[in-house]
Image (spheres, grey):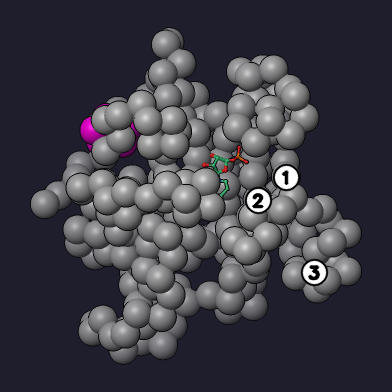
Amino acid sequence: MQILDEIISGKAKSLYRTDDPKRLVMRFRNDTSAFDGEKTAQLDDKGRVNNHINAFVMKKIEEGGVPTHFVKLLSGQDSLVRSMEMLPIECVVRNIATGSLCRRLGIEEGLDLEPPLFEFFLKNDALHDPMINDFHILTFGWATREEIEQMKSMTFRVNEILKKLFAEAGILLVDYKLEFGRCDGRLMLGDEFSPDGCRLWDMQTREKLDKDRFRQDLGDVVETYRLVAERLGIQIDH
Ligand code: C5P
C-alpha cells in the first residue's frame, strides 16, 4: 500500500489518501493544542503513544459490538482506517463532572453523574464548537433521526466497554468525546480514542492522566500517557 497526499491536517492528526480509495492513513502527530488553538506545543513521542493507545481501544470497542473505521496499526505514528463521510458533530459522555460542564452550569467539580450525561457539540472551530441538541441536528440536516439515535446508543455502549476496561487498570473514565461518520451505508465510530480526547483519573488518587496535564501545565504529559498505556497492558513498538 502506498501513502499518497495529505487530505486533512487537524490539530493533532493528519489523514492521507492511499492507493486504495476506501482506505486512509491516520497519522498521530506530536502537535498538541488547547483553548481553541491558543496554546500549542510539540510533545515528543505523543503521536506514537497515542497511535498505540487508539489501536488498542478501537479494537476493544469493535469487539464490544460498535463498528469503527479502524482497520489496523501500521507502524509508529500511523494507522489504516476506512474512508468515511464524517458528521460535523461531537458526542460527549460524562461520568464525573468537570471541564466545560462545571463552567457552564456551576456544577460541583468531581460530582458522580448518574445516569451519565450525553451532550452534542457542533464541530466548528470558528464558533468554538457550540453545544447543540437533536433539534439543531435535524433542522440543519447534520444527521438523520436514526443516526442521532445510533450516535447516542453507540456512545453509551462505548461507555460500558471502556469504563470496565479502564477500571481494570485502576483508572476512572471521567468523560470523552467521540465522532461518527458514514461508511458503506452505515454509521461507524471514526476519529480517535486517546488521552487527548478523554479525561482519565487515577482511581485512588484522582490524579489526572490525560490532556488536562497539558491544559493545566501539570507537566509529564507524554510520560503520563505512556503510563496509561502500560497500565492497559499495551506494548508500544519502536
Ligand atoms: O471541554 P469539555 O469538558 O466539554 O470536554 C469534554 C470531553 O471531551 C473531554 O474529555 C475533552 O478532552 C473532550 N473534547 C475533545 N475535543 C473537543 C472538545 C472536547 O476531545 N473539541
Q: Is residue 201 above or below residue 190?
A: above
The boundaries of the magenta stretch are: 223-229
Name the N-terminal-most of marks 2 and 3: 2
- Horizontal side of 120 relative to 29 (left or right) equals right
- What number is the disc on residue 91? 2
Disc 1 secondary structure class = strand
Q: Position of residue 121 (x, y in %)?
A: 69, 53
Which residue is located at x 26 percent, y 30 percent?
A: 220
**Residue in front for this viewpoint, 66 or 147:** 147
Residue at the extreme top: 204
Residue 6 seen from this side: yes
> Is the Cβ of the residue at disc 2 closer than 8 Å to that at disc 1?
yes
In the figure, residue 123 lies in which quadrant? bottom right
Which residue is located at x 47 percent, y 54 percent?
A: 37
Is residue 227 on the magenta stretch?
Answer: yes
Mark 3, residues whose alpha carbon is within 10 Å: few (<14), some, or many (≥20)? some
